[in-house]
Image (cartoon, coloured by chain):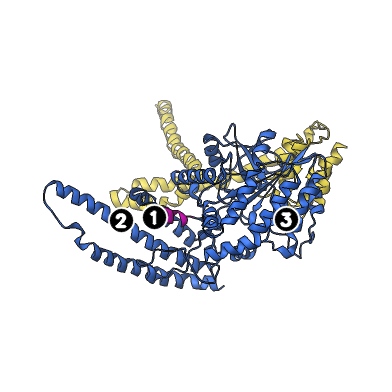
Amino acid sequence: MKLTLFFMKIPTIKTFFTKVELPAKKGKLAVSAAADKPKKTISKKPAVKSAVAKTGVVKKPITSALVVKKVAKKNTVKPPIKKVLAKTVVKKTPVKKISTPVTKTKLVVASDSQSFWISDGQILNSLPALEAALKVMPVAVYRSHADSDSNHFADWVELVLGDKICAVALRKAKTAKSAAVVVQKHLNSLA
Amino acid sequence: MLSVCPYFHVHQPYRVKRYQVFDIGSDNQYFNDNSETDLNNRRIIEKVANKSYRPTNKILKELLDTHPEFRFALSFSGTALDQFEAYAPDVLESFQELVATGRVEILADTYHHSLAFFYSVPEFERQVSKHQKRIKSLFGVTPKVFRNTELSYRNDLAKWCEDNGYLGIMAEGWDKYLGWRSPNYVYRPAGCERIKVLLKNYKLSDDLAFRFSNTGWASYPLRAETFADWIHAHHGNGETVNLFMDYETFGEHQWEHTGIFDFLRALPRVLLSHPDTSFKTPTETVLAYEPTGEYDVPDVLTWADTDRDLTAWTGNDIQRDALAKIYALEADIMSIGDSELTEVWRKLQTSDHFYYMCTKWSNDGDVHAYFSPYDNPYDAYIAFMNALSDLQLRIKHLIDKKTGEEAAVAVDKKTIRIPVHKHEDTIMIQLTIKMRMIAWWRQTVTHSVFSRFIKK
């Protein structure tokens, strides 16, 4: 009898676990939704209040509140795990030390119609010429060709000179001097 | 081989006199100022003719006679041509002499120097058509290259020009749209297949138009030889140097004592001293060179101010209000079909009226103040809006008259006679009072709002 009672209790244990886990799964869904749209989680409280006021049913608001609490608990647990993962990634990369093959690009001299026409009248046809011009370029002239929307220097280097690596670095430069340093370093790497 | 394409724009607006609120309903002459101020259109034409048009045309004719290779382009607003005809017919004849040489090209334009393309394409088309007829009748030529008011340009305008058979269009060679490219080449407008765009070399053009007499400028005084060297420096990295500027640069913006006439006299000789330098008209330039790339201008580009956009005319609320009100009259004006009213309406569309209302400061503000005949933008707005109120009154009167006549005809058909026009005068008086009240209210309210702003 005891044995049969023991086996009969197994499903009840299973149902017990499922009852515990189910809200947890719902909670996970709520986490992802809340992460995407943070404003909606803020607006949940008045929504719960209004639901209580309208229907008078207390159960639903309580369960949703529980879900939120569980979510909060899980959030507090997760970050340390991520940190560990991040550390392992950092550790792995130096071990591998994959040497990226540097493709040495030849210096291109632009044709007349493809030369860079600076707004102050200078005309450039190569990276060394660009470097020399950037070193002494006034702020206003640089700004007329490079702002938050576009960077003519990078466009020209990429489209005409065909140097994508230098173009990417030039887009990050915020001043004429830093752009000149970028070009100088790039030229040194090619030498 | 490098060619130089000089182009000079000739324009004079009909300036609105100091039209008072009390003139509404009683005075329908908005452009007949007789004072000794710069609002007197006759006086301005005579002054500029003496300072600029007559001496410059004389020099240009000499240059055409001396140098068979010398050629250039002109564009005229219809309002300038009308005023030459009325106040200085000899100036118009001297222009006709230049064009008769066959080496001076005339460009297509809007008749009333308006921004109509950006507000009403049908009205824009009517003005371009009128301009074309006027040019044909005065000079016997049909323009093949288009330039829009204030060199304003956009992709859809280029497309319109292509669809209407033009070979080329002119635009500002602005860094924002050129990027790293040179303005010294011919380009293809975005979305077009045949038409080519000629870009103004704004640096070299502005050296003459704005900096020539600036004593603080590093290159002052500019000699023709120096300027020619700057142009010759483009051999090998350009095909055409397009020098676009106001015709009035010679003698009016840059006075005679600055040496601008001597500069003009010497320039063709020193430019042609280089064996590979030549002069070309816009049509010759368009036909000579193939486009090197695409010129994509999705937003309005002009040659004015440091912004190179429409803000010189549409930058503040009073400008936008005035523009909205003038173009709102289109349907009524067209339905009436009165040629005199239509002409007045179009004269009020001239972009200069809105330019005078500009409240930009700094360097741009100085340029606006130089060109404005009014003491401040507020005065320009009040004069314009009072004149516009009177025009609205006249339009309403004519519409009422027309609908009244139609009603009378309809009633006549039913053999019942009703004296429709009996109360016309009282309606007119009521309208006049109403319009005056509106104008007075506008004047007092806008003055209180803008007076602080303007005094700064």
Chain to which mark 1 belongs: B
| Label located before the other in sequence (1 or 2) | 1
Could you say which chain is coloured yellow in the image? A
Q: CA distance from mark 1 to mark 2?
A: 10 Å
Disc 1 vs disc 2: Cβ atoms closer than 8 Å? Answer: yes
- Residue B348 in the magenta stretch? The answer is yes
Q: Which residue is mark 1?
A: B341
Stretch of the chain drawn in magenta: B342-349
Callout 3: SS: helix
Q: Report the amino acid beneath label 2.
A: Leu
Compare residues A170 and B177 and report the one nearer the observer. B177
Residue B260's x, y, as percent?
73, 59
Q: Is residue B285 left or right of residue A112?
A: left
Could you say which chain is coloured blue in the image? B
Residue shown at 73%/40% (left/top)?
A156
Counting other residues with Cα less than 10 Å from the Cα at mark 1, is it few (<14), some (14-19), or many (20 or more)? some
Disc 3 vs disc 1: Cβ atoms closer than 8 Å? Answer: no
A109 is higher (above) or lower (below) than A175: above
Residue B207 numbered mark, or none:
3
Q: Is residue A11 left or right of residue B309?
A: left
